[in-house]
Image (cartoon, rainbow, N blue to C red):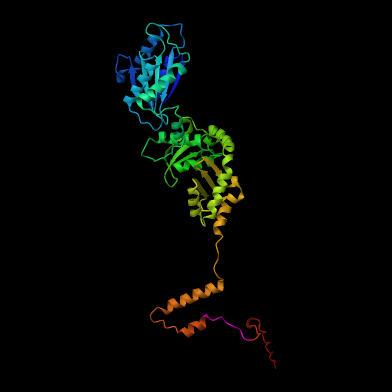
Amino acid sequence: MVAKIKSGKSLIGAINYNEHKVKHGKAKLIAAQSYAKDVDRLSFDDKLFRLKDLAARNIRTRTNTVHLSLNFDVSESLSEDKLIDVADAYMLEIGFGNQPYLVYQHFDAGHPHVHIVTTNIDTDGSRISLHNIGKLLSEPARKKVELEFGLVQADSKKNVESLERRQINALDYGSTDIKRAMTNIVNEVVKNYQFTSLPEFNAVLNLFNISADRGAKETVMYEKGGLRYWALDERGNKLGVPIKASSIYKKPTLKLLEDRFRLGEYLRKPFRENVKSKIDQALQGSGNREKFIAELKRSEITGIFRQNAEGRIYGVTYIDNRHKVVFNGSDLGKNYCAAAVVDSFQNTPTGGNASAQNTDQATQYASDINSVPGNNISKSLLEELLEPTHQGGSENLFERKKKKKRKKLNL
């Protein structure tokens, strides 16, 4: 669990933020601690005035708003009741157990989380100190709550490493919350893979049935640097409605990706020679594209050949899934580009000369005919037909001189 605490001067602003999410179906009010009415009966004014009443008891303190969030690991599935219990236990540990507060469950990110809104002004008008609250109170409270409720521990090195190595499941359209699943996949790819262009980024996303699209070049979205994410089926066809990059948690927009392109150029360099070595080994043990891809897979490398509408191969991309790096074949050298790899598959031994092949075909054809009832072709005649024709003497039949016609005398 990760706790984030923000202080401010606008209670109405903090509540408005969460109520806006509720209005658009991206959040839900699940608890209202120390309120006179049940959650489903509270109006906006009820929620606001309960906190403003306390804040008004200390007019000297302008920073009177506390807006915090509790964030849980993506692998955790927490019910409303458990989220409420966790929120209550945490607020008690940081000294806000007796304060009125609102707990909102949010659905707009790839991980479970809640937002809590309260005030740091007590019933007697005294101010609850927020100085260094993160280190002095929040951290010990977080650790205690994690152990009490069996939550994933944020500072556990073992758990952090396991999360980094976690296998991402491909997007299964229609079987889950598309936005949440897409958010998890996109953010994991952006965080862990090293790529240097949008096509390389898409090469990885396509493995998980997602595609990042800028739109057609003549569109306003393309000109403005917009980006949207599509769900794909197993054949790579787009499904449903795309999701804007700006509406995804952590906002993986084109601008953010361009920073990742530059960073990826340096971070992938140490693995370049290792990838080339794996490709060399795969080429030695394969004679066609299918075997080559299978050999690469044994080394945890995904080979993706790019084809145009006519089926012509024009490029290849290598994804090292062990070290999370992506290379185009041309970036590794001319021996690793698509043309060179495909040429290596085509160096197969050829058969005999054309005349021998034609003779074999003729023999087979005659044999087939002779096997049909009623076709009594003698063996001697067949052999005669298959024998090459020899010209006698040195005369060329096609170059015989034409005899001159004798002119008749007209008497």
Residue that extends furthest to the bottom in the rendered view of this protein: 411
Position of the N terminus, as image quadrant, is top left
**Looking at the image, which residue is at 54% across and 57% down?**
345
> Which segment is the magenta one?
386-392
Q: Position of residue 191 (x, y in %)?
A: 50, 34
* Observer-nearest of 132 and 362: 132
Q: Position of residue 238 (x, y in %)?
A: 44, 42
As drawn, 170 above or below 39: below
**Looking at the image, which residue is at 54% across and 48% down?**
278
As drawn, 102 above or below 158: above
**Looking at the image, which residue is at 56% across and 33% down?**
259
Left or right side of 258 for 134: left
As drawn, 125 above or below 96: above
Position of the C terminus, as image quadrant, is bottom right
* Observer-nearest of 320 and 365: 320
Q: Please name the predominant secondary structure of the magenta segment in the image.
A: loop
The reply to whether residue 292 is in sight is: yes
Q: Position of residue 159 (x, y in %)?
A: 43, 32
**Looking at the image, which residue is at 57% across and 47% down?**
276
As drawn, 91 above or below 269: above
Q: Which quadrant would residue 171 be assigned to in this image?
A: top left
Left or right side of 116 for 306: right
The reply to whether residue 17 is in sight is: no
* Observer-nearest of 305 and 42: 305
Q: Which quadrant would residue 176 be assigned to in this image?
A: top left
Whether residue 351 is in magenta: the answer is: no
Count of labels in the image:
0
